[in-house]
Amino acid sequence: MSVKLTLNGREITVEDGRDLLSVALEAGVDVPHFCWHGALGSVGACRKCAVKVGDKVEMACMTPASEGMVVETEDPEAARFRAQVTEWLMLNHPHDCAVCEEGGACHLQDMVVATGHHKRRATGPKRTHRNQDLGPLLTHEMNRCIGCWRCLRFYRDHAGGRDFDAFGAHDRLWFGRHEDGPLDSPFAGNLAEVCPTGVFADKAWSKVYARPWDMTATPAICTHCSVGCNLTLNERSGTLRRVQNRYHGAINGFFLCDRGRWGPWSADAPTRLTGPSTLPDLTGAIGLGSPRASLESNWALRRRVGADHFFAGITDSEAALTARMASLLKAHPTASIADIAAADAILVLGEDLTATAPRAALALRQAARGAERDLACQKGVALWLDQAVRVAGEGRRSPIALVTPLPHALDDVATWPLRRPPHAIAAFARLIAAALRGAATDPEAAAIAQALAAAKAPLIVSGASLGLAGPVEAAAEIATALGPKARLALFPPEAGSFGLSLLGPVGGLEAAVARLDRSPGAVIVLENDLFHRADPALVEQVFEKATSVIVLDHLATETTAAATLAIPVAAPAEAAGTWINHEGRAQRSFGFRPPRPEAPAAWRLLAGEETDLDALLTCLTGDLPALAPIALAAGPATPRAHPRQSGRTAQDRAGRVPEGQPRTDPDSPLNWSMEGARAADPALATWTDRPGLHSVSAAYAAQQWIGGPLKGGDPGVSLREAAPDAGPMTDPAPGDGLIGLPLHSPFAAHEADTASPPLAARTPGPRVALHPDDAARLGLAEGARLLIDGRPAPAPLTLDAAISPGHIGLTGLRAVRAVKVKAAP
Amino acid sequence: MTGILDQLWRIGRMLARPKQTRAYPEVKPDLPPRSRARIVLTRDPDGQERCVACNLCAAVCPPSCIEVVKAETEDGRWYPETFRINFARCIFCGFCEEACPTAAIQLTPDFELADYARDSLLYDKQHLLIAGTGKRPGYRYWAVAGKAIAGKASGQGLNESPPVDLKDLTP
């Protein structure tokens, strides 16, 4: 169904059941607006989007677009109304723009300028607020609040946070926590982008602040989990200044997680490795690839040492599990993050989604609201009326089953929050598969099976967070039983895991040790802290058996400390590379600063100093023709510098007046200067602002429809079909004694996360947790110091009844396995 | 003929006029205070730096000759860690002064900036900062800004009411 209406004298045809504001914005008419947000819907809180409909002034965001409507946005009466609204919104807004991080890219500034208000006529005093310390990630300046409620709608309604609320009444309205302290939600960082003024700002950016137009913008891919969210990295004077969300219709949409937003700061971490960057002779050396390195780096290492000398720097079982998950990509329809949000019945098997793929957990929370939206629809409530949908939906939730070993952050939206020990998850999932095939099983499994079978778009989620093949195989089995309507989302451990699997079958550290036994030689480790990837005893065997160990990394880690030679290379954020996400989508990331000879990209170091990315990709796709789609043609020259960049004739001129050559990038069509034209290809999008709309709130302008794909298509090419085949796997028996259970944190997954100073300040410390009964049985008390497999535990013991008996929760453990626990002497 | 006489008369008449030419540099010109030449950074009446590194001068500068890098003091004030003007490029248009929300950057009538080395036309903060308030005596940006700094808590600025009591339920 579509309706025809007249907008500013132009007849447009739009889909039925839309609000007038979205329709106008999509039609290219920039109606001033404030509380409306593409992902949060309409609430009508600010009265800013007044337009003339027929002979009445109406709020565009609260008016359904209907047949025959005549809408005038520039009608004098509507314009006067908007100007008055602006004036009262600005009544208490402080004279702060000069010392506000948001200044210059502020939605409030844009809207105030758009309505022509420039002087405060009121003479009364301004109301003020007390601010809170919101921890290391965000600032809080409540004086700047104009009460649009976006923060609360995002934090509570969208992200499910609980420790943030509205306080006070009418013009004393105040948003914050009940007490000082960091916001609990791992999505809190989005407040800095959602807030249309400067109440919340990125604290890390504020410390090294530069105005938005004084920074260069580089399109990059997040390398901190396997989802592959799109980022914009902002640089000035060669250092990282800010990380922002870059809209991608199928992946991150409008929001990022905190790990993605502050993870790239490891590029300027104090623990960066320094030293000479020349490779010694690598003849006969064994190469250990990395799930933290780009596809190019892993391939360059493989080519340098030879395919028969190349192993993955992870355990054999993890390498096999990742390869199996990659091969399942082509067996079942995969689920992008947007698909997860659109699913109507979800089964999560073992995956601690909030920690291992946070953005997917946020999408799952939206999927939970599907049933609520359906009921509201039946009652005739338009879906864009977000608050009305919540009331009319009567709190209904789509069926979601979480079968996990530990309490889950998504339990509050789950119909079946089920706790099973790690090795029992697969068995339970097989009961569901059996129920789908018509066999009688236990009632919970039957109920879940029934919900999945009844759904139009069921989704099965699993992954490597337990390091077990059982849940993954069971997920595939259920997806097969459900047929082609079911999607399967499998999350590998890291951003580069699938890249490593696509290079072909490869053994892990055990295979490397066996190889070293046969023919001892040097070992070269690529961007990997092996002690974080495998049992330290196994890693020590590598060190013992290798004649020398050469490590290429951007961080000083335990592995570089133990190595014979540690060679600094570029951080993922400062090197171009291709990353393959959980759905098999290959995306190109670019470095935020020019290649530096003191820290070259690992692939450049391995392939030869003169190589650029295009040359390398030509060789790569010649070697592996299945990966041919990643070698995209270079685009036209695109500027990273903003057209309003300031200080160009004063920067770096102290003591040397002759103007230097502009910096160039051999690996992309992106210039660090203003030269070139803005790219039409969204994969090369740098600056998206335009005169009048400078803030991230104007991201909708690049979308085909609001919340839809980007104009020019969402970036990335699918490599689903390129994965080598791998047969089904079974888990070995867990062994005797306590079974170690990996504890994941949404703020830190691996050593590059904890190297980022903002994340290091936010990450809760490591945990060692035991069920009180087990502790009593072993004679251990809370706070006891333990030896795990003969090594000191990373933290004192905490007792936690949520840990299943017979298990010990351990931060930093990569996979479920039996561990030997005793009290430290 | 009349043309020649007319010209002689017009030129000859000037002989009696007072001389306009100044013997510069021996005699310095007497320029009005609003003439636009060498740029300075002024201070608050209490001696604190006025510039808050907001970058508006740099943004508005047509030849892009101002570079500002923001830093923050322990008491919460923003200040420029770097403030550099390339006078080899400056066109003395005065836009920076107009854009400045804190009255920090001001143009003075001192126009004698010529030099033999272009390096010496790069003025850093220590060259630009003066001791006084310049043309805007009495103005303190931090008194009217809403951001709290040490010594001025939220609600203690000019024309500000005390911070809201969130538990107040009165209408």
Image (cartoon, rainbow, N blue to C red):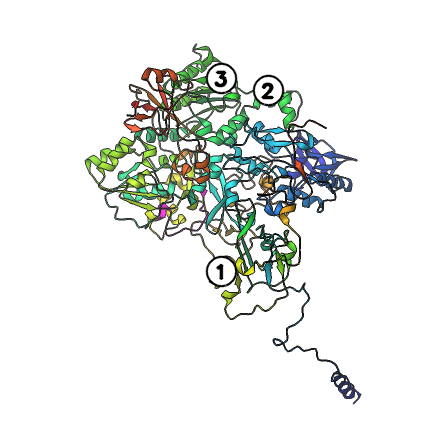
Q: Does the magenta stretch include residue A601?
A: yes
The stretch in magenta equals A588-604
Identify the residue position indicated by label 2 in the image: A395
Q: Distance between the residues labelled 3 and 2?
A: 16 Å
Foreground mark, 3 or 1?
A: 1
Q: In this view, does A506 lie to the left or right of A37?
A: left
Amino acid at the residue labelled 2 = Gly
Badge 3 amino acid? Trp
* Residue denoted by label 1: A653
Residue type at mark 1 is: Arg
Quick check: can you spot residue A587?
no
Q: Name the residue under label 3.
A: A416
Q: Mark 3 lies on which chain?
A: A
Up-down relation of residue A800 to residue A57 (above or below): above
Counting from the top left corner in percent of width and height, residue A450 is at: 49, 15
Closer to the chain start, of discs 3 and 2, is 2
Side of A111 where A534 appears, left or right: left
For disc 1, the chain is A
Ranked by sequence position, the earlier of labels 3 and 1 is: 3
Say above or below: A122 vs A732: below
CA gap, disc 2 to disc 1?
62 Å
Q: Which of marks 2 and 1 is nearer the N terminus?
A: 2
Using a 10 Å C-alpha cutoff, classify the residue at mark 3 as few (fewer than 14 neighbours), some (14 to 19) or many (20 or more): some
